[in-house]
Image (cartoon, helix red, strand yellow):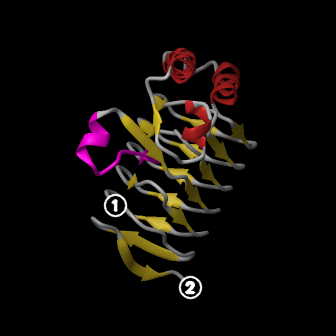
Amino acid sequence: MTEKEKMLAGELYQAGDPELANERLQVRKLVKTFNDSNPEDVESRISLIRQILGKAGKNIWIEPPFYCDYGSNIEVGDDVFFNFNCVVLDVCKVKLGDRVFVAPNVQFYPATHPLDPKVRGEMWEYGKPISIGNDVWIGGSAVICPGVTIGDRTVIAAGAVVTKDFPSDVVIGGNPARIIKQLV
């Protein structure tokens, strides 16, 4: 397997691989252009978003600045909004459903590293996919950790550190996040 194939499969891989380094460089050029774009040039911004992301539904909007590793592993549904300064380390799939609202400074971290310091020191890493359901609201400065799945209509409070899966129809918050309230 190539390092890219290992990365996408969630296996240990070397991020310094030339193919992966080149892909990151190419998307960083697009991201820089997007982040530096004129706020009045909506068509250009939407075109750049569609070039950066692997899949983008209708009515996608991202407020710059925005940062990602590859872009191609990010899939978003319809009517998705990212506010300022969001980061998606998309070494594997990061999927957001329809009508997901992402507040400023939200971080999606599917990328992770081995706990063994020797293996980690040899620059190995891996990823675990993140999946966000429909009609989810993610509050400012929340962190979504590797391998997390969030159910539909869930609200993630500002500053939450989400380290595990949560069902639909709850409000979660804290560090680590826990259920604060049932919505239905």
* Amino acid type, mark 2: Val
Residue at 49% in and 31% down: 69
- Front residue of 45/56: it is 56
**x, y percent for residue 78:** 72, 49
* Mark identifier at residue 184: 2
**x, y percent for residue 59:** 71, 41
Work out whether residue 71 can be spotted.
no
* Amino acid type, mark 1: Ala
In the drawing, does residue 121 fall left or right of residue 87? left
Say which element carries label 1. Answer: loop
Residue 171 is drawn in which quadrant? Answer: bottom left
N-terminal label among 1 and 2: 1
- Report the number of discs: 2
Q: Is residue 181 above or below residue 33?
A: below
Please tell me whether mark 1 or mark 2 is closer to you in this view: 1
* Mark identifier at residue 23: none
- Front residue of 7/82: it is 7
- Bin the neighbour count of mark 1 within 10 Å (Cα to Cα): few under 14, some 14-19, many 20 and up: many
Cα–Cα gap, marks 1 and 2? 21 Å
Work out whether residue 174 can be spotted.
yes
Quadrant location of the N terminus in the rendered image: top right
Quadrant location of the C terminus in the rendered image: bottom right
Furthest toward the right, the residue is 58
- Front residue of 55/140: it is 55
* Mark identifier at residue 160: 1
Q: Which residues are magenta?
A: 107-121
